[in-house]
Amino acid sequence: MKRIRIVGLCLVAVFAMSAVAAASASASPTYKECAKVKAKTGKFATASCTTEGGTGTWELVSPKKGAYTSTTKVATLETPGVGSVSCKTSKGAGSITSETAATTTVTFSTCATDGKKCTSAGEKAGMIKTFELLGSLREPSAGVVETVLAGNGPEGLSAEFSCEGITIKTRGSVGGVDTGDINSAGKTSKQTFNKATGLESEIVGLTPFLPSNQTAEATVKGKADIGIFGVA
């Protein structure tokens, strides 16, 4: 049997939005926005909130403009002993909702397995749309931050779709390593998903939920200068 490759269904995306001046090494990572303030009232000299002093026209605040988009090329979800589903691209849209949380939804295009198109209910053939994904931050090791995306659909599902007669469900979460926004604010960052954080897949009527893995790289773009701060 083949191995399942689903394009980072829990991707996304997404969340690699981060940033604000470094906090103590013991602090938990949080989303911060580098906002412009009246001259000499802020702590930082640049829009990345990494250089202190100067005219003092920038300061770290809780995210106010947290909307962002994400894109990927091919992403894969691997489920041992089942088969493979692949999607060529994806687009996501979400928002950072607090200093520690975010939401996103991702739509994958040109999805297929063994020549059969894979499609979510209500979508065009070959398109898989996730349920809402809930994002959170964790620091598994010093200086490394992961955005964890967890399914928030019915019964915790992250996605459900059919491949011309075969129905597949995914649940649980995946973790993507954030780069480009650690202790530095900006409008663009990346998330690299290459290991699961409790992700499972089920082929309805054929297999129970089995441990799965996802790989994909997401480029995240926001409207404000946001980063992940408080990282060792």
Image (spheres, rainbow, N blue to C red):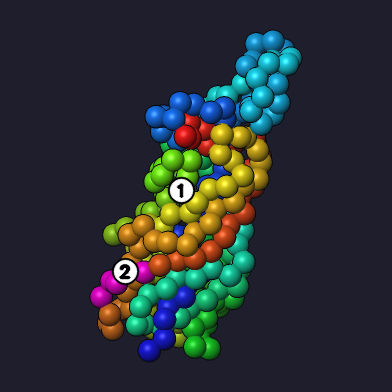
What residue is shown at x 61% (from left), y 58% (from top)?
71
- Residue, disc 1: 146
On the image, the x and y values in percent for residue 164 come to 45, 85
Q: Residue at x 47, y 45 (%)?
A: 144
141 inside magenta stretch: no
Q: Would you place residue 187 above or below residue 81 in this image?
A: above
Few, some or many C-alpha atoms within 10 Å of disc 2 (few <14, some 14-19, many ≥20)?
some
| Residue 150 appears in the figure | yes
Query: What numbered label is drawn on residue 211?
Result: 2
| Front in this rendered view, residue 50 or 172 | 50
173 w.r.t. 119: above or below = above
Q: Position of residue 106 (x, y in %)?
A: 52, 59
Segment colored magenta: 208-212
Question: Does residue 26 sit above or below 156 in this rendering?
Answer: above
Q: Residue at the location (53% across, 28% down)?
A: 22
Q: Quadrant of residue 100?
A: top left
Q: Quadrant of the N terminus?
A: bottom left
Q: Amino acid at mark 1?
A: Glu
Q: Are marks 2 and 1 in contact (CB under 8 Å)?
A: no
Residue at x 44% of width, y 30% of height: 25
Local crowd size for mark 1, using a 10 Å CA cut-off: few (<14), some (14–19), many (≥20) = many
Residue 203: image quadrant is bottom left
State how far apart marks 2 and 1 are (Cα). 19 Å
Tag shown at residue 182: none
Q: Secondary structure at mark 2?
A: strand
Determine if the magenta segment contains residue 211. yes
* Residue 5 position in % (x across, y down): 46, 75
Query: SS of the residue at dot 1?
Result: strand
